Image (spheres, coloured by chain):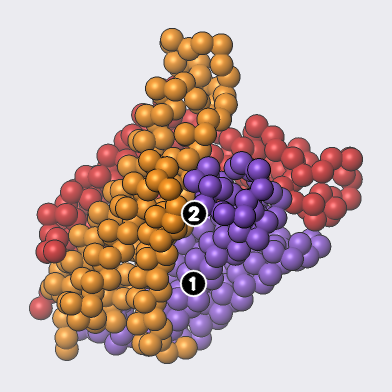
Chain colours: A purple, B red, C orange
């Protein structure tokens, strides 16, 4: 019997863990970018957050374009990184070659770090849409390999 | 020792991969539906997206009811499909029968495709709420089987 | 060969299933809290939902601070619970001790139930931000153990 695909015995699973780590941490980091802008610009979503800011001016809960931009970037991560991590796990279970797996994981991870950079710094299009599409098609390529092993 | 439950050796894991594939791809497709309406109706979320549209009128970033509807549908997928895929993986690990597993996976998948159809085409209620509830209770049924195997 | 880490043969996987169950169900429950406030306060997001409410007044789709608060709480769950469940699965694969695993799972789960309580009842800060941070750092601690086993 072969070793379990989803275990430390499988070097591709260990590689997957590394890239899943990177993109999940990057996604979680968006919460802190949001918090940074909320606090420095005093743009809070809740009354109790306004009340806690001792140096508050007279502002109640409000929205701000920069905070909304960070939140859209975070949302885009949720919409793309989570599917990658889930599909990637199934992809590892299909037993890809080390070369193919590392290519998928690296391209996806790079695409998402670039996407965040392009989004947060408002880099002119089509940079952001291209990085988004590279990520999507990398996930779809893994999905294709998963589908090839399906038995309905 | 039995074969690993989360591997290609387990036909129920292969079946799970198929339905996880379908609902994840469906969720990701919502990004493209959003993009389609943003581009055809020139309703962009970012200044750099407006600037990239050569044939732009004088419109800045704005919101539109149709785009918001697609985004709510996408959000509802994130809120329901991701829990299904995660709970489904644990459910497969509990060793369900082929019949029970396929029933859960098929009903959930059908409920989400119907939910999207009802949402995007504004079909009168209670169609959408019913398809939503069928999906939720299917996931809860899998969750019940997972909980029965728990050892805290 | 050792038993597969991600299987019922591993008591830590069974423990993980229990806490993943709790936090996923808690996250899904937010949909029903949202629905409760939408229905009792007649604050709907879609025209067809307004039309379905027989006792409707003349209100169209609208937003309400309480509904938005519940939705922010739900969104915060998606941003934190999903990464926990994914990272937790990889963490279980690394073979932690029962003590370490149960400590991580219990602290995270408690932090998220408290976070929801603090959020929904508008408890004065810093209660909510502290419960949020405890959850984040618990996930990061698991992530650290995952990263230690990575082979890029």
Q: Residue visible at 19% across and 56% down? A: B146
Task: Report the side of B123 relative to B16 (left or right).
Answer: right
Q: Are marks 2 and 1 in one subunit? A: no
What's the CA distance linking mark 2 and mark 1? 23 Å
Q: From the top left corner, tell me how far across and down residue A130 is, in percent.
A: 71, 64
Q: From the top left corner, tell me how far across and down residue B2 is, in percent.
A: 12, 74
- Image quadrant holding the N terminus of chain C, namely bottom left
Q: Residue visible at 47% across and 69% down? A: A24
Q: Which residue is mark 2?
A: B25
Q: Which residue is mark 1?
A: A25
Question: Which label lies toward us, 2 or 1?
Answer: 1
Q: Residue visible at 53% across and 42% down? A: A47
Evaluate if marks 2 and 1 touch, with contact meaning CB atoms under 8 Å apart. Answer: no
Q: Residue visible at 56% across and 79% down? A: A106
The number of numbered badges drawn on the structure is 2
Nearest the viewer among C72 and C11 is C72
Task: Report the side of B65 relative to B54 (left or right).
Answer: left
Q: Can you say whether C16 is above or below A48 in the image? A: below
Q: Can you say whether C37 is above or below B137 in the image? A: above
Q: Can you say whether A116 is above or below A47 in the image? A: below
> Does residue C54 show up?
yes
Task: Report the side of B65 relative to B114 (left or right).
Answer: right
Nearest the viewer among A129 and C146 is C146
Q: From the top left corner, tell me how far across and down residue C138 is, in percent.
A: 35, 70
Nearest the viewer among A81 and C128 is C128
Q: From the top left corner, tell me how far across and down residue C40 is, in percent.
A: 40, 22
């Amino acid at each position: 019997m072969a070793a379990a695909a989803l275990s430390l015995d499988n070097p591709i699973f260990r590689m997957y863990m590394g890239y899943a780590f990177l993109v999940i941490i990057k996604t979680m980091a968006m919460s802190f970018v949001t918090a940074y802008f909320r606090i420095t610009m005093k743009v809070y979503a809740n009354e109790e957050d306004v009340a806690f800011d001792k140096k508050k001016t007279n502002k109640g809960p409000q929205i701000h374009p920069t905070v909304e931009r960070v939140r859209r970037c975070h949302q885009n991560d949720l919409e793309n990184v989570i599917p990658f991590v889930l599909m990637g796990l199934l992809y590892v279970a299909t037993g890809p070659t080390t070369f193919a797996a590392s290519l998928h994981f690296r391209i996806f991870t790079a695409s998402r770090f670039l996407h965040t950079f392009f989004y947060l710094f408002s880099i002119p299009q089509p940079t952001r849409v291209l990085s988004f599409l590279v990520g999507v098609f990398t996930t779809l390529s893994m999905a294709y390999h998963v589908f090839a092993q399906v038995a309905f």
